[in-house]
Image (cartoon, coloured by chain):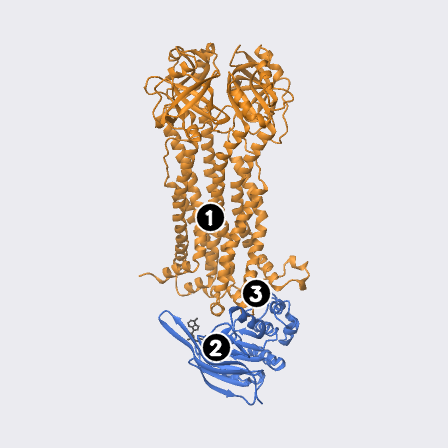
Chain colours: A blue, B orange
Amino acid sequence: MEKKAIFAARQLVKTYHVGEVEVQALRGVDLDLYESEFVVLLGPSGSGKSTLLNILGGLDQPTSGDVTYRDHDLMKMTETTLTDFRRDHVGFIFQAYNLIPSLTAAENVQLVTDIADHPMTPIEALRVVDMHERKDHFPSQLSGGEQQRVAIARAIAKRPDALLCDEPTGALDNATGRIVLKAIEAVNRELKTTVVVITHNAAIGKMADRVIYFANGLVSKIETNHHKISPDEIVW
Amino acid sequence: MVSSLTKKAFRDLWGIRLQVLTVALVVASGIAVLISSWSTYDSLKKAQSVFYTQSRFADVFCDFKPTPSTIVEEQKSISGVLEIEGRLNLEAMLAFPDINEPISGRFISFPDTAETTLNQLYLRNGRLPEGVNEVLVGENFAKAHRLKPQDELNVIINGKLRHLVISGVGTSPEFIYVLRGAAPMPDDFHYGVFWMRHSSLSQMTGQTGLINSLILTTATGINPKQVISELDENLKKAGGLGCYPRADQTSHFFLSDEINQQKVMATLLPTIFLSVSAFLLHIIMGRMTSIQRSQIATLKACGYSNLKITLHYFLVAGLIVTIGAVIGILAGAWLGNQMSILYTDFFHFPILQFTLRPILPISGILISLGAALIGTLNALKSVFQLAPAEAMRPPSPPQYSKGLFEKFMILSQIKSETRMIFRNLALRPFRTFLSIIGISLSSAIMISGTFWQDSLEFILYAQFQKAELYDMMVTFQSPQSADALTEIESIPGVLLAEGYRSIPVRIKYQNHSDLGAVTGLQTKNKLRRIIDRQLNEVVVPEHGILLSTQLAKKLGAKIGDPLEIEIMEGSRDLLTLSLVGLADDFIGAGAYIHANNIPQILKEGPRFTSIALKVDSLYEDEIQQKLRNTPRVAGILSKKGLLKSFNETTAKFIGIFSFILSGFAFLIALGVVYNNARVIFSERTWELATLRIVGFHHLEVFKLLFSEIVALVFISIPAGWALGYGLAWLSVNAIHTEAIQIPLVVEPKSYAIATLVVLLSTVVSAGMILRNVYKLDMVSALKARD
Ligand SMILES: Nc1ncnc2c1ncn2[C@@H]1O[C@H](COP(=O)(O)OP(=O)(O)OP(=O)(O)O)[C@@H](O)[C@H]1O
Ligand SMILES: [Mg+2]
């Protein structure tokens, strides 16, 4: 079966200049990400995983190379069209939840549904992550895992094509991490959203379609899983 | 080797340099206002006293009927009299070939011998008059008419035209503030002072060997009152109009009043400005410190002592205050100097000595520094109280809740963004309150500056539209019979003429006395009314005497008290009148009795000392021409001309004052609004980055952030109006001028200007914040969650 790539990166280079020193975060990455697949990005600290994810999601621009989203060349986009691209097509999850403290769970989701094109209702989105009963709670009234699930609901409410997660379980214990991973897995399975998860936990790779290994600003290895396991079966 | 903590101080400051600048400008405004207003006051005070001493300004002044000059010698024996000088002092009309408006002048003689005299003349240019036809022109008048030595001057004496030549331009301590009897403000175009050698003036006026004025100095430690009572007694036979001390001398009285007002302003304005800037500095330093809460904790965890950290933040605060102080001292000294020049020019002081006492900048810096340090300490205290480990974590998430306000709104209809605004404001009510106070203070400062114009315009309106309804006021050298009124009434173009009789008197009550005039008015007056502060006409009672509230206060008299009235002319009777009413008017210290009582008091038929005219404006020029050539007319006051010259001098002055104040108010408003926005921005950088990440555009994020500021500004505007009215009230009550009762009037215009200044500073802050929103880097904002 021929899979359609939604993201395609070619010879992606990202160089930071700090004073006299030059840091190469990405050294020419070639990578395709396909529709509705679940990808896990593994690699040592500083290998460039976050940098790649930020570029794919339109938060950052590469120094050179090509990156396309479907037929759109992200390199050619302006600040405004990049913002629209994020608004309509990608959802982000970060280690630090990033909820707005002054808004309740439902309102945090509504923040996105107010501006998206064909969004779910906030309740629908919260139901996907099983947080609809806590919809009126403020972030400060929720646990870390619960906050992360609200963040997932907020990210998927716009029915994005891709959900980009940078260490979503990094700040959580195993049991809570498992619940969050189940929510992400549910999004991938039920909504057919392409999911990319950055993690330092190799075990999480077992639930992915593909595991992409990063080292030194380059893709070092890609493994395809023929048998995915559910988050419940992961041994940490 | 610079310690890394010092490096941090400088880097922190550089990172928030716009914030530093705005705070420094607030500090600078406070210090600049302190320095400029006090140094202006000091300089004026100094200029006054130096000029008085150098020119040997007299202590006592006496006016009487023309009398042989031997009377001077007779007074020398009075104990306490140091130096004494007799002179002629009279008013005359002037004629300018191409000016139709009435212009008159006071002519004063000075000794023929070149010896040093009292009230010495200060020459601006040219030389003192020598020849028979030479005259020295007062500087104010010379400026208004661009007169210079060798120019001709035409005087009408007893209806005859005389040609004089100007020998020079100068001034004297007696006429720093040139006021004509009835006029409430200087009018340099229509009224001037002229000096001639005694022989020349007496010859020109046909009063050879006569004098009608004495000036004298008293020995130190002598109470002028004693000397005055003896003099008054001696001068009775010369038709003495009463002697008065320097304190009652018109120019000195108004000048001192003006200088005192400056003193009140110099106390009031810096107090307001410095407290506002200290208040802002306190908040701003506090916020800057609390934003760095986890940094502080980290420093503590690394082993830095509380003292070291406190000193670090003091260094930051000290640097901001220093920047502000340098700007403030420079700006204040410059402004003070400019103001002094402006004042010197306004009063035509011959000498300007700009004095800047070192205590001023020092106290300004200390107050600002103190505020900055207290603000920093307060904020640090709350951080120090936490264990480092706890403080290192970001502050525990604030406890947001749905406000009361929201419960009444249909929830589904409000956007999440709108809710964020209200909840953020409601979360920290105290801070929201402080911000509102800060912004409203800036518009209050504006209002406290601009309302002066409103009050002044109100006085002008009251005085010239409600009280003095005439177009012209003609005054005579001596009382005129009823024929004069008929004669003037018959001049073509005169629509209405009303004559008044004023009697020079000394009013006494217990230990207090005042030299002035009592004017007779009818029950119904067409052209000249007494009005109270509500602009209602005050009717002159048929018996007894009516005083303006100011004068009654000065005498310490209440309604029903018997006042002793000493008539200073003719019969020189002494009568007792009961104080039957008070006129709560704005200008002057008048005394009024019913006109019907005057013939009986003076034992004479109806006579007039002044006549008010309502004229057809087409004939105005001709009427003035005609009056000028009428013998015995001492002066003509044209209301139109008076208003015109007022607008060119005093009004302009107040305009400049308001403009400077607006500048400072703008800086303060900018300081508050921008810093507020800036603090909100840095506290929520991370939140704003999140919004950008989920797909909010720059402008949407900006709108969200700025709506909060706009909400604050809109609450602050009416609060500022109220505060401004309060400050205006305070200013009016702080200034006790004896010349004018200032009414508290704040026109919508003043509120509008204040609002505009706040809005302008909001727009400028908006620009600065928008720039920050565009510069916001989502990726690094995520990394540095602090
Ligand atoms: N703004 C920046 N300026 C300079 N260098 C940077 C910047 N951002 C990232 N880098 C460098 O780029 C490299 C890749 O960083 P990146 O955050 O992508 O790594 P990562 O794989 O996500 O690491 P980790 O697993 O620790 O999150 C690192 O060496 C980092 O130091
Ligand atoms: Mg990373």
Q: Secondary structure under badge 3? A: loop
Q: CA distance from mark 3 to mark 1?
A: 32 Å
Q: Give, as a three-letter code, the residue at label 2.
A: Leu
Q: CA distance from mark 1 to mark 2?
A: 49 Å
Is residue B119 visible to us here? yes
State which chain disc 2 sits on: A
Give the residue number, with chain letter if any, for mark 2.
A52
State which chain disc 1 sits on: B
B618 to A152, vertically: above or below: above
B339 to B257, vertically: above or below: below
Say which label, 3 or 2, has the lower sequence index.
2
Q: Give, as a three-letter code, the residue at label 1.
A: Ala
Q: Nearer the viewer, mark 3 or mark 2?
A: 2
B635 to B750, vertically: above or below: above
B102 to A184, vertically: above or below: above
Q: Give, as a three-letter code, the residue at label 3.
A: Pro
Q: Nearer the viewer, mark 1 or mark 2?
A: 2
Q: Secondary structure under badge 2? A: helix
Give the residue number, with chain letter if any, for mark 3.
A101
Q: Please indicate whether residue B564 sits to the left or right of residue B127 in the image.
A: right
The 10 Å Cα crowd at callout 2, few under 14, some 14 to 19, many 20 or more, is: many
Q: Quadrant of the N terminus of chain B?
A: bottom left
Question: What mark, if any, has residue B406 been given in the picture?
Answer: none
Label 2 CB less than 8 angstroms from ligand 1:
yes
